[in-house]
Image: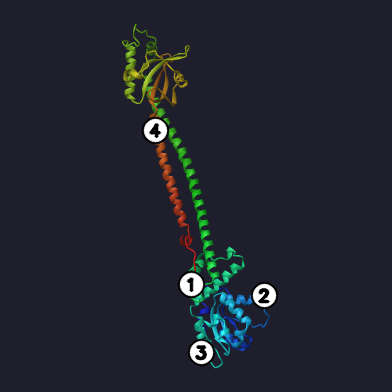
Amino acid sequence: MVQPSPRRSGSTSPFDPLKSNDVFISYSRKDKAFVETLDAAFRKVDRDPWVDWDDIRKGEDWWRSIQRGIEAAETFLFVVSPDSVSSEVCRDEIEYATQCNKRFLPLVRREGFDMQHVHSSISRHNWLFFREADDFKAAFEELLKALDTDLEHVRGHTRLLVRSLEWLNQGRDSSYLLRGSDLQDGQQWLTLGINKDPSPTDSHVAYINASLDAETAMLRARQRAKWIVVLTTVLANLAFVAGGLSWLYFRMLDIAREQVKDSMEDALAGAIEGIDGDDFAELAGVELPPGQDEPFDHPLYQDHQNWLLTVNELVPLAEPATYIWDAKADEVFSIGDVYRITDSERAHGFRESKPSHPEMLDGFEEVSIEWDPYEDDFRTLVAIYGPIQNSAGESVGMMELEYDATYVTEVAGEIGVAIGVACIIAFIWLVISSWLILRATQPPHETAARDRPPQNP
């Protein structure tokens, strides 16, 4: 007794069509009684044959129905008899099944036909004999065994053929293509099925290659979109970080300048504190001995110069000098100058006129700082100025402390280097973290699928 096949329930093949038939039966109407018996035997074992029971004339709707039945069937059964061999309709069905590379199983029902008239797709396959003299039960057992041979490949062939033809009939609409794991299964089927029977058709190959191309393009577009998002995020974050670090840089620079200013102001206050304003006013008006440029022997001058040297020794970065201002002549004249002791080439002579500028003139009335570096014949400088007052609180002169500009610029440079390093570290971290996020959010199959080559039969 023929047992029902368990394959129709619980099959796990990824290529099981949503609606397919086990076999398509092509036959002559004179063999209808046999086909009815065959159909009943199939249904008894839970198989689903496709049989055209209606004797209608060939037309477009009828033929398209036949084509769909052949496409969706896993195996093409041809009932061989003199009438089916000579039938034009049967020959058309065989031709279409051949185009679809269907698996053929010829069933000989009646002999007496001319082998020269048998279609080549029928004659080159092994035949099963279902003649009246043959044991139907045994022949049917052989038929079921043949149908179950390499079943997964045959099901894949059917499913992919139906889908590829649907794709072609819809004008190669990309929405009908394979995707994801379905595409991976299709690619594997094509690779393994090249040397199997039935072999893949051109439609199979075109469909799977188009699916691969579409998925590769989609993955690359998705990858580009991800990189755009990542780069945009990196640039936005970098701009945010750069803005924050720039603010921090200028804030730290302001703080550093405040510290430098406080240090300069403290040094200036201490330097002015050591000068008696009344003595300074007297020194400024001393008469020079004939033939002398400086009052070398005058005790006030000696004390004044020694004090300037002391200031320089206590604050090595500061180089002090003192001046008076003739408002009527609008000129500034040098009184004391530490350079006369430390570097005569840079010194201004006693009561020698010196070019003035607004910050210097302000220094006769209040503390004033010249932050913008200026140059003399030797180097670039910044300076702080403050008034020298007599016992009556009147301004009788001005104290100047000059500093090499690197005193300020080096501080700014060190801050700038630190901020620059912080920017580079932040940029590298943003790039690495964004790349890690990009990799972490990429589905595992995308890396392999992106570079997968197209398949050829």
How packed is label 3: few (under 14 Cα within 10 Å), some, or many (20 or more)? few
The foreground one among 247 and 225 is: 225
Q: Nearer the viewer, mark 4 or mark 2?
A: 2
Contact (Cβ within 8 Å) of mark 2 with mark 1: no
Residue to which mark 4 is pinned: 411
Contact (Cβ within 8 Å) of mark 2 with mark 3: no
- Secondary structure category for the residue under label 1: loop
Disc with the residue nearer the chain's start (2 vs 3): 2
Instruction: Name the residue type under label 3.
Output: Ala
Disc with the residue nearer the chain's start (2 vs 1): 2
Query: Mark number for residue 337?
Result: none
Residue to which mark 1 is pinned: 194
Instruction: Name the residue type under label 4.
Output: Val
Q: CA distance from mark 2 to mark 1?
A: 33 Å
Query: Mark number for residue 60?
Result: 2
Residue at the (64%, 75%) spot, across then down: 64
How packed is label 4: few (under 14 Cα within 10 Å), some, or many (20 or more)? some
